[in-house]
Amino acid sequence: MLNDRYVFSQLIDFLPRRDFDRCVARYHGNQRTRNFSCFDQFLCMAFAQLTYRESLRDIEICLRALQRKLYHAGFRGAIARSTLADANEHRDWRIYADFAQGLIARARRLYQGDGFGAQLEHTAYALDSTTIDLCLTLFPWAQFRRHKAAIKLHTLIDLRGNIPCFVRITHGKTHDVTVLDILPIEPGAFYVMDRAYLDFGRLHHLKSGLAFFVTRAKSNLDFRRRSSRRVDKTTGLLSDQTIVLCGPKTSELYPDPLRRVVYRVPETGRRLVFLSNNFDLPALTIANIYRSRWQVELFFRWIKQHLRIKSFYGASPNAVKTQVWIAICIYVLVAIIRKELNLEHSLHEILQILSISLFEKTPINEALSLERPINGED
């Protein structure tokens, strides 16, 4: 009976187990493993993410307190802090990265009909990075400054649903713009970036891949105006121009015309200058597409506040990447559940409910379909 199963077990049913087993086999994850499989490792780390555990000892104590319930929740291996630490240290993080990609593809299909604040038929992505500070004593391999360690999380999100579809974890010293060298280019898609990614050679590579970009211009941009289009200044637009670059280096790196849209934010009066290689969309749509870029900032803030990616259960690069990728799996899994169960709750509210109901015997749709709280915050 469904209501005889724990919420955690029903939650795990949303995971494609065959896909997970293929990822494990691809990297020989269960080789020389007796009592603690990769799936057991994933369940332990998922439990830690969903219930906000602080450390490996915290995970061990809580799971052992639930010992009689673990088998019925899907756990098969013996839970021990040292075993989980070894698994995070040595089992290839790419198992969970590949598994996350399958979940991401499923989530993107579910959210492909959603809007994001701009009237656009094409797919739109926002690209940015966030820095996660680490303790230099514990993470000497990630030295960022003289007395500081850090890693960077470079993320491309699909603005329809805020689903991360490209994630790269690098050293804190890695410059943001270098990610454009390995970014998969989708013809016809829009890539929205801030000024950190203003590299005209790399932007021309995006154009050559038949993709569009929207980014911010720097104040010292050397250009010549070719033509101008009329704009409705009551909307905040100040100008819409076709330009060519005049700098000796930039004109060689990007020899084609660019579109320059100047917009004043009505609420603050701030003047923003956008560059794009799309000449068909209305100028106001270009401005609205760039405004949607803030969704990637909100995504970073969300996962830092509601998932365990600022403090880590292991100090090796493999352990850090394993934890980050499993956190992304949980984020995408909650997004999938929200859509497939037609929930009105925000992702944060769903996580809050799950954190206190994982080991209750309640149908998951009933547990998550509680009356929405008044003035609930996302």
Image (tube, rainbow, N blue to C red):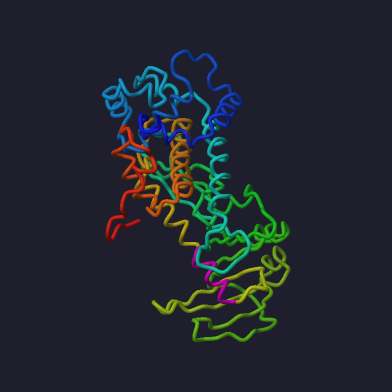
- Quarter of the image containing the N terminus? top left
Q: Nearer the viewer, residue 227 or 72?
A: 72
Residue 357 in the image: above or below residue 273: above
View extreme (front): residue: 1
Q: Is residue 343 left or right of residue 66?
A: right
- State how many labels appear: 0
Q: Is residue 285 left or right of residue 13?
A: right
Q: Nearer the viewer, residue 267 or 110?
A: 110
Q: Residue 270 appears at what percent x and percent y?
A: 43, 76
- Quarter of the image containing the C terminus? bottom left
Q: Residue 224 appears at what percent x and percent y?
A: 66, 79
Q: Quadrant of residue 121?
A: bottom right
Q: Residue 292 appears at what percent x and percent y?
A: 50, 64
Q: Is residue 22 left or right of residue 173?
A: right
Q: Nearer the viewer, residue 349 or 27?
A: 349
Instruction: Specify start and end residues of the magenta stretch as a single range.
Output: 283-292
Q: Is residue 338 magenta?
A: no
Q: Is residue 24 left or right of residue 131?
A: right
Residue at image position (42%, 36%) is: 11
Q: Residue 329 appears at what percent x and percent y?
A: 47, 39
Magenta: predominant secondary structure element? helix
Residue at image position (36%, 50%) is: 348
